[in-house]
Image (spheres, grey):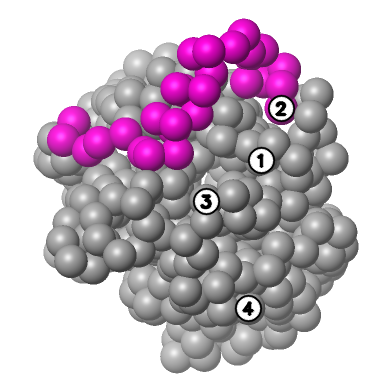
Amino acid sequence: MGRGNGAHPDRAPGGGIRRVVLGSFAGALLEWYDFFIYGTASALVFGDLFFPEADPAVGTIAAFATFSVGFFARPLGGVVFGHLGDRVGRRSALIWTLLLVGAATFLIGLLPTYEQVGLLAPALLTLLRLVQGFGLGGEYGGAALLTIESAPPERRGFYGSLPQAAASAGIMLGTGVFSLCDWLLDEEQFLAWGWRVPFLISALMLAVGLFIRLHTEETPDFRRARAVAASRPERPPLLELLGRHRRNLLLALGARLAETVSSNVVNAFAVAYVGTQLAMEDRVPLNGMLIASAVGLLVCPLAGRLSDRVGQRRVYLFGAAFAAAFAVPFFLLLDTRNALVIGFALVIGYNLGPTAMFAVQPTMFARMFGTRVRYTGLSLAYQVSAILGGLTPLIASALLAAGGGTPWLVAAFTTTVALLSWLCVHAITPTPPTPTTPSPRPARRPTSAPAPR
């Protein structure tokens, strides 16, 4: 408790911020786990189970199409839960997102296959994927803000990166479960029932995450904003966001593209590319992503800590530049068909590009929007741009086919998007890192935001 007493009177004390971080991380872990196991299953089994009449390559594309539809529901979820989070509270919104994503994931594990019920199977799969996407649409902004708004101003980059590490933990956990099933079961057993295990065990994680979030407090920033709003009329968060923060919203949308596209190329498309196009065992890319995500658990807080010293914008610029420069070398390394080299490519490609950007993203974006619209702003910036991220495996599969099985069109697509994002980040008004010793004068605190409140 002593650590928090001298940091800032409006911040959570040491024990309080630890509880907030745990609550944000636990819920985000479940939701990222749920979302990533769907991507892995799309690459490995959904084509055979739900689209068996198609050519294997076409079946993979069809499976990735259902993967993509969840991203179209995410902006709607961002608006709905952003409004709830900005008006009612971050905590309330996060409880609902957790329930929706957890329930949809569990039900996917119970679905009948095409062989059992025909076209109803892919229809139900698509519906549950939409529910998953709708729930996750409100998760990103809330989990990040719950931590950032409770942290000392001079350490918001570090604390904001901790819930982001849940993405790497979700990949590691989801990939690890799939790898374990692949190791313990033969192909027939895995296709018959083994693929359901990762989805069904999410029920246990849902119970734990829900318990933690029900015992998490609301953020100090939100409580102060609501106290001010109670004394004056206010517009709906979405209207105020579009009216006063339109430029920053557009820049955040563009900045986000490099992270979401490069991430989905590495952790979704590359898994299918190595297993299908290069005809290697599925465990090669799965094990590679397992290691990459484990490293990501360390990279996230390190990038966040660095951003408190040099600013989130500089760290993000580095990540976007790396994603652009590494696109071609990434596929050259995959094409060696050497398991160790492929693992190295996945570790480097995942961590120095998308993970570096993802770690500092919420803190950088939070400083671009006022407290009363911050949940909506973060959610929209993240989820609208996520549509292209969700389409990335589908686009990449089509570009691979157009390129005659060579990945260079995919690499060119990744590089182009990353350069666009670099330009958007460069155009964001720089925010200097917060001094290590926070000012005792509350009047100086709003100077960290590049946009007027």
19 or 96: which is nearer to us? 19
Q: Position of residue 85 (x, y in %)?
A: 46, 25
Q: Indicate which disc, 1 or 4, sits on the residue closer to the N terminus.
A: 4
Marks 3 and 1, how far apart in space? 19 Å
Q: Are marks 1 and 2 in contact (CB under 8 Å)?
A: yes
* Residue that label 4 marks: 310
The total of numbered circles placed on residues is 4
Labelled disc at residue 369 = 1
User: Disc 3 residue type?
Assistant: Pro
Decide whether residue 228 is among the magenta residues. Answer: yes
412 or 143: which is nearer to us? 143
* Residue that label 3 marks: 442
Numbered disc 4: secondary structure: helix
Is residue 76 toward the left or the right of residue 185 in the image?
right
Q: Indicate which disc, 3 or 4, sits on the residue closer to the N terminus.
A: 4
Numbered disc 1: secondary structure: loop
Q: Quadrant of the N terminus?
A: bottom left
User: Disc 2 residue type?
Assistant: Leu
Is residue 90 toward the left or the right of residue 446 in the image?
left
The magenta-colored residue range is: 214-241
Q: Quadrant of the C terminus?
A: top right
